Amino acid sequence: PKNGQTIWRHTLSAAASDRFSTIAAPVLALSDGIIVTNAESVTQRLNWETRSVKWSYSVGSVVQPKYDEGSVFVAGTDGAVHKLDLASGQALWKAQIPTTSPLVAMTLLKKKDIVLVATANGNLFAIGMKLGSLEGVSPTSTFGAVTGDFFAGRPEQNEVCLSYRTPGYACWTWNSESRKSPDEK
């Protein structure tokens, strides 16, 4: 920040078939490095100290990866949620989302051990954090396209809000009693 000089840089490798190899998702900062993903084909863990790639995983994302207890969750451009081991980058499970709409938002509801993902057309899917099982699917969205990421809400009650084209935003909570679907608030 003193002089604007670049301290270090890294070029994220991409598959030759990538049309969009840019970094579209916010980087996930960790104490010893970062998790970065391009828009199509690769997610990498970079080490701050050595300024090198610690591991690579062959799926890209437009959603910021999430971290929880030694694991990284990636909403892949392949239409699946991936749980990776933070240390090795090895896949612990892959949960294919039953939709043709891209995954555009993801959050963790830690109290209920749920990964909540949203598709571009506004549907929500709840995935169990431990095994990657599909725990619930929202009804078809009448709000239109998702225009942002999950935000705010009341986390202690497993409530989050999501930006939509119409009506602006909606808040959702995971109904742990029925464990069938997220309920609209």
Image (tube, grey):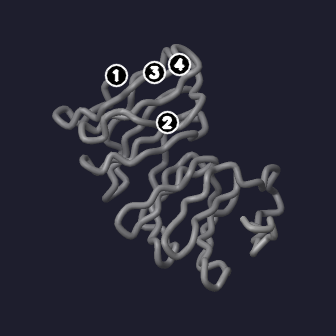
Q: Secondary structure at mark 1?
A: strand
- Tell me which residue sits at (48%, 44%) in the image: 106
Residue found at the very far front of the displayed protein = 2
Label 2 and label 4: CA atoms lie apart by 15 Å
Residue displayed at 52% across by 76% down: 32
* Amino acid found under the numbered disc labelled 4: Gly
Residue 160 vertical placement versus 58 (above, below)? above
At mark 2, the secondary structure is strand
Quarter of the image where one finds residue 45: bottom right
The residue at the point 78 percent across, 56 percent down is 21
Separation (CA) of disc 2 from disc 3: 12 Å
Q: CA distance from mark 2 to mark 1?
A: 13 Å
Mark 3 or mark 4, whichever is nearer to me: 4
Say which quarter of the image contains residue 116: top left
Which residue is labeled 3 in the image? 140
Residue 46 percent across, percent down from the top left:
62, 74
Would residue 15 be found to the left or right of residue 167 on screen?
Answer: right
Residue 184 is marked as 1
> Of callouts 3 and 4, which one flags the residue occurring earlier in the amino acid sequence?
3
- Total numbered circles: 4
Q: What amino acid is labelled 2 in the image?
A: Ala
Residue 154 image-quadrant placement: top left
Distance between mark 1 and mark 3 Cα atoms? 11 Å
Q: Nearer the viewer, mark 1 or mark 4?
A: 4
Mark 4: which secondary structure? loop
Instruction: Tell which tag, 2 or 4, sits nearer the viewer.
Output: 4
Name the residue beneath numbered marker 2: 118
